[in-house]
Image (cartoon, helix red, strand yellow):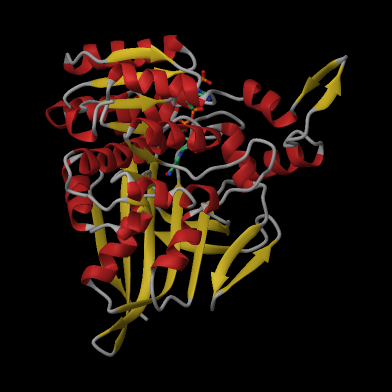
Amino acid sequence: MSTINDKKGLLIIGAGGVSTVATLKCAMNIDTFENITSASRTLSKCVKIKKMIKEKIDIDIGVAMVDADDTSELIKLIKKVNCKVVLNVALPYQDLTIMDACSATKTHYIDTANYEHPDEAKFEYKEQWAKNDDFKKQNLTALLGSGFDPGVTGVFVKYIEQNYLDTIEYIDIMDCNAGDHGYPFATNFNPEINLREVSANGRYWEEGKWCTTKPLEISIDHDYPEIGVKPSYLLYHEELESLSKNIKGLKRIRFFMTFGDAYIQHMNCLQNVGMLGIEPVEHKGQMITPIEFLSTLLPDPASLGERTVGQTNIGCICEGIKDGERKKFYIYQICDHQECFKETTAQAVSYTTGVPAMIGSKLIYNGTWDLKGARNIEEYDAQPFVDEMMTQGLPWKIKEMEI
Ligand code: NDP
């Protein structure tokens, strides 16, 4: 079998909204990636991405069909394309099979969301972290969570720790999507994953303990720079698990996301009638899973780009100590839905995930980031990543806040 040194090229698995952006952005960086293959369950979606890239920037990529739930199919494909790095932008359900296929073929692995079991509405890093020794022994990297949140949020925190504060004591991650797609109800990334996340209990970490809240029980009004004041709801989000472990001296970390009234009313109603259920139910002699059926009915997030207007603002407020003095910084990134659409045919939520997925892949591919094992993004040097953000479409800002 080839070693990592004689493998080349990038294999991108999944061909949805995030992949549309990530694949185009990788093609824009073809000097790094040498060759790119887009593989997914539905070949026509890969072909659509291939055509869009050819039309936009005249770069050719390969396409392939793969069922990423099947490790042996993945191994065959990875061996065939002989790629050096696999970028997983399919669904969190496929994280473990894709990691196993990477390990079996000596290939680096990158993803944007942590593993979730389809039959249990719970996500955690445990099973991916359990693969750390295996990746390390083989001199391979599994970069976990290289989207925006998780992803850039971890990079932002690390950047503050490296440059602005000696100790970070409090972190609030603030995620605002002020975009309007004009539908009464739609989710801006995979509906099943999105609704499972939002309808779950809230959770935050304080003084070494996890505190649980009812779904959307805690909300604050937050003033998002260049957007304005928006009600923001406390959710559990996966980077809380890794940041609470990796940022030394931390006392509290929370995550807040904005939702409009219409979104919350629809979600509550769907929850109340059982449409968010993940257990199969019998309907006219057939077993169906309510949330999967709902996903089929809702607009495809990849189709929202053209009609979404407005901006996103995602950032981190970090408070702590610098040279004995208490200080607080807000580091954030603003994206415009229509500008993202013009560049990539996708809206800003896919854009803000797809660009960091490309940057993480680039830094692993070219060896700038070379920590081995299954590691979260905040374990790496933040500088090369924040520098790439400035030139690859995600310029960011930082300001000091009053205590
Ligand atoms: P989509 O539903 O638009 O796309 C998912 C893609 O994965 C589809 O092409 C789908 O194929 C493919 N897929 C699903 N199952 C399989 C399988 N078994 N084998 C092969 N391909 C498969 O999702 P998004 O693009 O919105 O999201 C992609 C990922 O990004 C998700 O994991 C999501 O959680 C993550 N994400 C991360 C964010 C972050 O900031 N970190 C933010 C937003 C999303 P098909 O079309 O045939 O079903």
Residue closest to the eye, 34 or 138? 138
- Say left or right for 234 vs 305: right
- Say left or right for 166 vs 111: left
Q: Residue placed farthest to the left in the image? A: 31
Residue closest to the eye, 248 or 181? 248
Residue drawn 57% across the image and 28% down it: 183
Q: Residue placed farthest to the front in the image? A: 1
Q: Give the x, y percent position of residue 299.
A: 56, 23
- Residue 265: which quarter of the image? top right
Q: Looking at the image, is 72 positioned above or below residue 201?
A: above
- Residue 17: which quarter of the image? top left
In which quadrant is the C terminus drawn? bottom left
Residue drawn 30% across the image and 43% down it: 140
Q: Looking at the image, is 179 positioned above or below residue 316?
A: above
In which quadrant is the N terminus drawn? top left
Residue drawn 46% across the image and 56% down it: 239
Q: Looking at the image, is 184 positioned above or below residue 65?
A: below
Q: Give the x, y percent position of residue 211.
A: 63, 69
Residue 45 visible, this angle: yes
How many tags in the picture?
0
Q: Give the x, y percent position of residue 74.
A: 44, 23
- Residue 278: which quarter of the image? top right
Residue drawn 17% across the image and 48% down it: 368
Residue 347 visible, this angle: no
Q: Give the x, y percent position of residue 99.
A: 43, 37
Q: Residue placed farthest to the bottom in the image? A: 324
